[in-house]
Amino acid sequence: MSETKVIDACNTYCPGPLMELITYMKQAEVGDVLELLSTDQGTASDVPEWVNKIGHEMVSSEKVGDVWHISVRKAK
Amino acid sequence: MPSEFHIICVSGSHEKLQMAAMIASVAAASGDKVTVFFSMNALTYFVDGHTASAPAEGEFGGMLDKKGVPPFKVLFQQAADLGDALLLPCSMAMDLLEITDENLDPGFGPATGLTKFLMDAEGGQILTF
């Protein structure tokens, strides 16, 4: 059974949010969805680049107020 | 297609150490091969008994002490832990500082000569800070 884990990386600067995501991604199971919360503007473009390179799956990315909500599914 | 980044850290300024650490951590955690060669002033921050706080080179360096900016030492450690980056102390600098591997932060080593580093870096990108 896969689960969604929320990682709150708000108010940290590049590359803090991405490194937080990668840290939790290493511990996650294939199929798990991680939702990264970030106020760093660059994160919204950096995370999809990283996901594409590594081969995971972008689920969604949206800005709610000042916070980006970026969901990624671990694919391998 | 993974790339190879071979980073030489010489300067002891906060800005340069921060940028080197940012590149090392992101590249290593993205599957690229990363080696970081620490020499001169850059090595001293990773020696026990020395300060971990690097002085700012300019105006921006002071802003890096702001809450929420990942410390460069943490980023280098993440490069090693999450992406298998090699953190290599310069053997010449270690000789001058009169230290051994035991005096360095965990994850550092082995002591590496410049020739060996350059041989291993052949074909990859070398970035110097």
Image (cartoon, coloured by chain):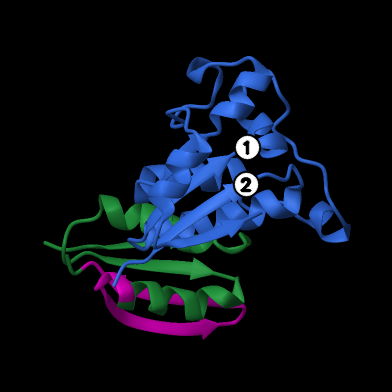
Chain colours: A green, B blue
Give the main secondary structure, helix, strand or loop, of the magenta stretch.
Answer: strand
Give the image location of residue B122, x and y in percent.
Answer: 41, 56
Quarter of the figure with the N terminus of chain A: bottom left
Chain to which mark 2 belongs: B
| Magenta-colored span | A53-74
Q: Which mark is residue B39?
A: 1
* Amino acid type shown at disc 2: Cys
Q: Amino acid at mark 1?
A: Ser
The residue depicted at 63 percent of the width and 62 percent of the height is A11
Residue at the spot x=52%, y=73% of the render? A43
B126 lies left or right of B122: right
Image x and y of residue B100, in percent: 53, 16
The residue at the far left in this view is: A1
Q: Specify whether A53 is left or right of B43.
A: left
Q: Residue furthest right?
A: B59
When the figure is inspected, residue B47 is found, relative to residue B82, above or below; the finding is above
Label 2: which secondary element: strand
Report the Cα–Cα distance between label 2 and label 1.
6 Å
SS at circle 1: loop
Q: Give residue B55's quadrant in the image.
A: top right
Q: Which image quadrant for residue B42?
A: top right
Per the rendering, the mark at residue B9 is 2
Q: Residue at x 62, y 78 (%)?
A: A66
Pointer 2 with pointer 1, Cβ within 8 A: yes
Queried whether the magenta region covers residue B79, the answer comes back as no
Q: Where's residue A76, x and y in %?
A: 17, 65
Dot 2 and dot 1 within a common chain: yes
As drawn, B115 above or below B45: below
Front-lying residue, B46 or B40: B40
Is B57 located above or below residue A15 in the figure? above
